[in-house]
Image: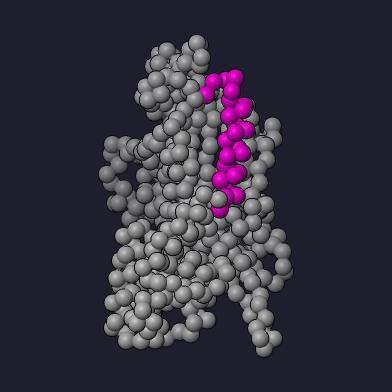
Amino acid sequence: MLTYCIRRRLSVFRRASVNLSPVHELLQVYRHYGESCDGGGSDPARLMVQLLQQRFFIPPDQHHAVSLLRGQACAYGPLGVDLKRNILEQWWSSVVRSRPQVFGISTLHGVESKGAGGDEKLLKGRGERVGEVLRQRQAFRTGLFQGALAQCVPSLELMNRKLPFGLAETGLCYQPEDHDDSDAIGCSSEVTEASLVWFCSHRTSSQWLDYWTRQRLQWWRKFALGPSDFSVRDVRDDELKQGALRGAKVLYKFPWGTETLETLWMLSDDELLRSHTGSQADLRCRDGKKLIVPHVISLSANVDRGLLAVLFNSLQHIEKVDSKQRLHQRTVLKLHPALAPVKVALDMGKGSISELRQVCEGLLQELLEEGISAWPGYMDTTLSSMDKLHTKYDEMGVLFTVMVGENTLENGLLLVRNRDTTVRETMHISEIRQFILTYISTAEKV
């Protein structure tokens, strides 16, 4: 996107002038998020970033770590992409698919103005010419709210003009930097937003705000290892945005402090009236026997910060003493089964390599056809002990490790290890698919 390209161009000029490298920038972020962390010597932000970079959640480039810690969109590795996709799918299922009054929509990021075709040439020039590019374009969206208002009138017929109903959307938005670091460059940052705009009558709007606040808190806590880290609070009067009558926030307690995951606003009918250029009659809906202009409840979630909250909430450091009284620490991402990027890791034990590989490939294909995400660990030719293998998969958040060995070739038996209990059990290869499906389905219903 143009804004991103311009920001990167500006950041080059900025860093050149102050000699600020991406590593120095990350260190500043660590200091910012580490100063208020408990534990003194250990820096949770640094440890989390190291884990995510090592285990394929984010690329090793440091500016992606900076963005993630600040609650902004960043580039994601294979596991990060799947985790984010799973969060968005669960959000969509909860807000849209399970509710007959909510409809999904899609809006544009922004509209290019004529005469902006020389962007590439301008960007090749000096930094002072960036302003010329910006003046030739309309700004990209800073939220999804206005797009829902624009689609309100066309959507009224879906509900036969009967209240309440909602319009939902997920997508990338561009928001002002919300930090005061000395290295801030004054540009907008990308944020993945999940939005629901709920249209209702004025007499029920306060109750609907309370309802959706409870629903959103319950949704976050459903996937939490530590539910108490998620909370809600009412927005104080001095924090209300213009036009809002009430507000609420869903919060998460990070090691460095509490930050907002979702914001909910109760708005009057002024928002619709201002955005609609046609006749006011086009906006009227049925509330019982009355025809009224709907009031609006706005819900917006920062999915990138929510992803970071899920990761911190799922991370556990477990200490265990073995039979020789040696202390071992085990790091585990106990991600909820519905969110875990990888459900099954397939590896080979002792036996004929070619035959075991054929069994793994067949089982992998069977799992993928059922929509069960599987990691082809058997393709890694690096020799690792079982302890190192389990350490790797625990840090990746893999639910089950399936070991194919000589017994599989002889009688079809597999060794299955559970991430959360570390219990290993023997299971027939024909049972593993249904076992995984049942396990995930049961967890989603809790």
- Give the residue at the far top of this rendering: 289
On the image, the x and y values in percent for residue 209 come to: 60, 31
Question: Predominant secondary structure in magenta?
Answer: helix
Residue at image x 40%, y 16%? 282
- The residue nearer to you, when weighing 11 against 27, is 27
Q: Is residue 62 magenta?
A: no
Residue drawn at the location 50% of the way across and 30% of the way down? 198
* Residue 423 location, quadrant: bottom right
Pinpoint residue 114: horizontal percent, then vertical percent. Answer: 28, 36
Residue 70 visible from this viewpoint: no
In percent of the image, x 57 and y 20: which residue is there? Answer: 202
Q: How many marks?
A: 0
Horizontal side of 397 relative to 137 (left or right) equals: right
- Left or right of 379: which side holds 44? right
Classify residue 257 as left or right of residue 23. Answer: right
**x and y percent of residue 1 in the render?**
36, 49
Along the line of sight, the residue nearer the viewer: 380 or 425: 425
Decide: is 87 above or below 64: above
Which region is colored magenta? 200-223
Q: Name the quadrant containing residue 25.
A: bottom right
**Residue 322, can we see it?**
yes
Q: Write the residue at 50% across / 11% down.
A: 290
